[in-house]
Amino acid sequence: MTETAASAPKTVARRPARRRRASAARLIVYPALGVLALLVFFAVFADWITPYDPLKQSLMEALQGPSMHHWLGTDDLGRDVLSRLIVGCRIAIIAAAEATSIAILLGVPLGLFVGYRGGWWDWSVMRLVEAIMSIPGIMVAIVIIAILGPGLHRAMIALGILFSTSFLRLARGVVLSEREEVYVRSARVVGTGDARILIRHIFPNVAPPLIVQATLTVGAVLLAEAGLSFIGIGVQPPNASWGTMLNTAASYMQLDWFLAIPPGVALVLTVLSINLLGDVLRDRIGRGIAVPAARPKAPKRPPKTAPAAGAPGRRPSPVPAPDAVLDVAGLDVVVTAGAGDEVPVLSDLGFSVRKGETLGLVGESGSGKTITGLAILRLIGTTGRITRGRITLNGRDISDLSERQMREVRGKEIAVVFQDPTTSLNPAFTVGEQIAEILRTRAGLSRRAAMARAVELIGRVGIPNPAERARAYPHELSGGMAQRIAIARALSCNPSVLIADEPTTALDVTVQQEILDLFRDLQEEFGMAIIFVTHDLAVAADICDRIAVMYAGEIVEEAPVDTLFSAPRHPYTAGLLAASPHGATRNPPLPTIPGTVPRPGAWPEGCRFAPRCPHAAPACDAAIPLGDGGHRVRCIRADTLDLRRSA
Amino acid sequence: MTDAPLLELRDLRVSYRKRAGLGLRTTSFDAVKGATLTIRPGETLGLVGESGSGKSSIANTVLGLIAPAAGTMRFRGTDLAALKARYPSGLRKDIQAVFQDPFSSLNPAMTVEDIVTEPLRVHTNMTRAERRARAVDLLAMVSLSEEHLNRHPHQFSGGQRQRIAIASALALEPKLVVLDEPVSALDVSTQNQIINLLYDRRDALGIAYLLIAHDLALVHHISDRIAVMYLGHIVEEGPADRVYTAPAHPYTRALLDAVPDLDPAQQRARRARRRQLAPQGTQRHAETGCPYSNRCAQVMPRCRSDAPPAYAVPGGGTAHCFLLDPGANGAGHASDRKEPALP
């Protein structure tokens, strides 16, 4: 659930970077496509457009430079270079098509098969592939040609076999990962046969990276063909190919250097165009092959408008309570979405946490609870932006600190514990090292002192034999143990605020209970304020002092824990309580809230819950402020509704 | 519900082989250590346990994705265990599944029509038009419509995807549907929509469910019977209400106590009481005797040496715990037992 919550903004965030690159890519794509179109045109119409017969020798005109008669000059036998170049296009295309299709037709089915079948098949085929790949490609090609004999087609068969190994590995790799996907399990439960699962279910997911691989292979084949022809075992003289032309040029380098230019330029342009197209395709498809992430841009200084009144339904943010450790006021956050528009993900967010207090942020996926935590840490990526509001930490506004200053704040003043301890810890270091590293860089402890303190912390979070456990790697620990380590790490610099983002969601209930107890004990000892993000109201009931219920990017209700559960005032809170498995009656139909949480950008005007609310009235179309006091609620009918749970 | 059992597992064992060292030796690990369970036609059995308890291994074995190491699995008279995970078509279509994660259980490259009609394509001779017509009916049954047929899974929310998965699972009108954590990936407000849908279909079609979940409170809502697993063993089994309100096995009680409650005041009281309990062993699994003996607050000497057999529990069902042994010192504990779990 939280994963979706976290990934929703992330996907939104990824797009603009891709867009920027896409518009830059367009500048390259068209010339590249132009080059390839010209290549195809030449190949198809070579017979009509060549000014001379490419094989016709005329020794009288040998080794001439470019002239009106021979635009690109003539070679050692007086043949027209331009004509030979144009015919070479045809050879290039035939060669590329031949070798690439052989590579695909041979590599993909075999890769799919061994990947799916596994076992002995997989083992022996992969050893063979490794053997082929360990020998220089040109050697393999020469061996195959030695067996088959020289000539373009045979050379292409050789290259096809050679390049099939990369397709085989690609297809096998995709199958190995897709085979474990739940949809493949579903297909097997349905009774779909293996062949059908491979072709109908898995193959479509292999296709995107395959297309990319094919374009790259075409480029590689062109170069390899040129290479083979150059050393005389590809296209045989007198036939023209770029490789044989280069061969000729090499022999007459001293006499006529220009001979090397036309085939060289043709080769470079073609391969470059194809590789560029492959890159663009890879970015477009974006699946299967890793795309390096866009470099984060320097954070833009938010053009902040004063967090003053003026916007409808918005109150002037009050001065932070004097005892508040963290105070968030009138916070608006937007992320840049697909078409370049900024989509609001948080609006008019305001709350404060006191020392030693636990505030729960409760909501479903899409409510903005996770992004709230990230916004406080200013970890909202390259595309998220705080457009308005103030985040006051220990009396200092941190909403417009520079990235460098912010780095000082993170870990030291605000720490965070994430949902999945197995991925939030670095698998390459022991858990002790990971805690000690923070102590060394942040608290300036010596190596020895940092390690001693790390062991102490590990003991403090309830792990037996801390000195021994400090030397363990994250994968050697159970989920509960790993989460304890993550908590120890978060507390290492004694932060004043701890953001816990669904820290128990990935754990079993009995372990969850232990971790919740640990949070309480540590809070008593360290006195930090905790912001506890969770989707589970019952967990919030256990750990929190105060709860803010979030819906569609805003807080809809905030109250002390007992009040919220005994007398909820917002219909959404009441709906969640009723729908909770612990709250509902024994038999279905269980109470539900109709519909789903609207996505950012699709929030209704006025009360965002109104379309799903059983108590909606016409007045709900207008923006509604959150109200004041100890029990804040964003509902226009809050005073007239009785939403208390019937016992 | 007095008919012959639909599915009967007896002493089912599921093992996984693990490569050790350089991959030359293999070690074997028992995920399920002798499970005995019965599901009657139209009945819902909730199978509850924590991660690593073996509940998903049972699901995968029943579905024929893993061949069991030992024991029998009798489904309408056929021993599934003897088929070594190669089910004939007739059996396949009677046992279907809905998996946990609706984001990965639907093939991203297929359309909703392809997904929903896949079972029909494999098991029936229906024409394309007939299959499409049936798909429309199935979608209507899960409150989706014809316009959704040509869309891809990524265009739907989690709850909608789970509806599509359910439509596909019900396409062949199976006798048994294995629900592997069907709502744990969904939002609270959508969870109940899916549960209501499953419940409604069960009554309309007379399907039996094997519901795998970690949340006892949720399982209690829709199960007729509940079985509780701990480290490969089924430690307690019985009518849902009895197991939920009067758990007989200390582990079931601990599991119930750990489920957070919506009442903060009760939560506080419960935490205070929980903390007074003796510290529990850190080694989860006891090598001999009762598997829970290392963590049990009421452990007795014999728990460490002998494996407890199944004792009948007042109110229905059985539990593997010596506290229930009528011959031994069970009397003192009997009064405790009638009490519900800590409030």
Image: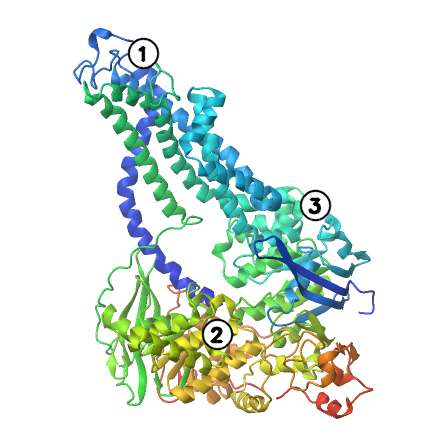
Whether residue A537 can be seen here: yes
Nearer-the-camera pick, A126 or B255: A126
Q: Which amino acid does label 1 sit on?
A: Leu
Q: In the image, A126: left or right of A290?
A: right
First reached walking from the N terminus: tag 1 or tag 2 = 1
**To which residue does mark 1 refer?**
A55
Q: Which residue sits at x=75%, y=52%? A: B83
Q: Which residue sits at x=27%, y=36%? A: A31
Q: In this view, does A39 lie above or below B227?
A: above
Question: From the image, which quarter does the C terminus of chain B lie in?
Answer: bottom right
Q: Which amino acid does label 3 sit on?
A: Thr
Q: What residue type is labelled 2?
A: Arg
Q: In this view, does B75 lie above or below A141?
A: below
Q: How is the image coloured?
A: rainbow
Q: Is residue A312 above or below residue B72?
A: below
**To which residue does mark 2 refer?**
A469
Disc 3 with disc 2 on a shared chain: no
Disc 1 with disc 2 on a shared chain: yes
Residue A404 rendering spot, x and y as whole percentages: 24, 69
Whether residue A360 can be seen here: no
**To which residue does mark 3 refer?**
B124
